[in-house]
Image (tube, rainbow, N blue to C red):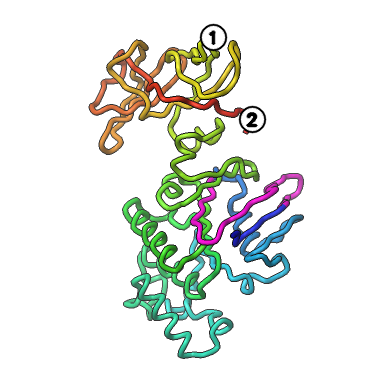
Amino acid sequence: MSLLSLTGIRKRYGARTVLDIDDFQLEQGCFFALLGPSGSGKTTLLRIIAGLVRPDAGELRLDGKDVLDRPPHERGVGVVFQGLALWPHLTVRGNLALGLDRDLPDPAERTERMRATAAALHIESFLDSRPGALSGGERQRVALARALVRRPALLLLDEPFSDLDAPLRISVGRLVKDLHQRFGMTTLLITHDRQDAYLLADRIGLLRGGRIVGTGAPDVLHADPGSAFAASFLTDAALISGTVAEDGLLETVVGRLPLEGGPGVGERALVALRPEEITLGSGDIRGTVAACEFAGGAWRCRVHVGETELVALHASYIEPGTETLLQPSSTLRRPLREDV
């Protein structure tokens, strides 16, 4: 069952169309990551759902009810903004309590709700501190607590980990996932970081130029991105073009690659070749290593084959300028769309 439904949502600023979404459904209990580059319309979409921006056209339903005319506090939506937006003059307790009396008129019930939420996020020890006295990770948990204390039907996260260092963003991300599961929430994460999307989401949607151009489970999209844009944005794959031979194989600068479906003999096709699909040190294709960077557990080598640059993973360092042999895997590849 869809908790969130968007139909025909359009938003323009002057002559520029920021959002153009025909249909988007978010299922109850799903953790969905909407992934896209800067300027793709992610934050505008989040603000429309939250009630902070009104679309020029379209329908927005939450739990089957049209909510476009409802103010933000009546939509049952919790939001964690990129800048956190905590009130600096209030204590953590004050930030959590703000507006909660509308949902819970009973003071005892409010106190218990705040206590339980603070315990879930491990912020009990600084409930009487102000945000300025807290670390970045502590402020992040407070912002989550403020969104969760009202038990929203939908939790919206706007680039919530962008200001955190790498270890902290992983730990806070895991906390968010745990809370999502514990409270049985529906969560929509807005991000430009594919690692956040891969780590947390049940499903990923790709937003480009205000349009959703692909959706799917993270592992499915990674293996079969469907379009040149998705392959480039979701992976470090090289985009390889070639011509379909009579035996159905794709003739390319890196050899003959197996295709799954696609164009006919003599026609052109484009495929993605991911780093993990390339073996260095053996094969029939000659290339030159342009750079070799340590990627934590493996070396990430950029290899030139003629004018084409590939990225391959290797167990040891290879000196730039070294000639090497390489072999793409025999994995069946579906041709990519080039029109999105």
Q: Main secondary structure of the magenta part?
A: strand
> Which label sits on residue 339?
2
Vertical order, 117 against 331 (above or below): below
Q: Position of residue 336 (x, y in %)?
A: 55, 28
Q: Is residue 252 positioned above or below 311 on the image?
A: above
Q: Residues within 10 Å of mark 1 (few under 14, many from 20)?
A: few
Q: Is 214 positioned to the left or the right of 279 in the image?
A: right
**Magenta-highlighted residues:** 8-35
Q: Mark 1 — residue? A: 246
- The earlier-in-sequence mark between 2 and 1 is 1
Residue 27 x/y as whole percent: 56, 57
Corner quadrant of residue 254? top left
Q: Which mark is residue 319?
A: none
Residue drawn at x 46%, y 58% is 160
Examine the rendering and report whether any part of residue 51 can be seen: no
Q: Is residue 18 above or below residue 88?
A: above
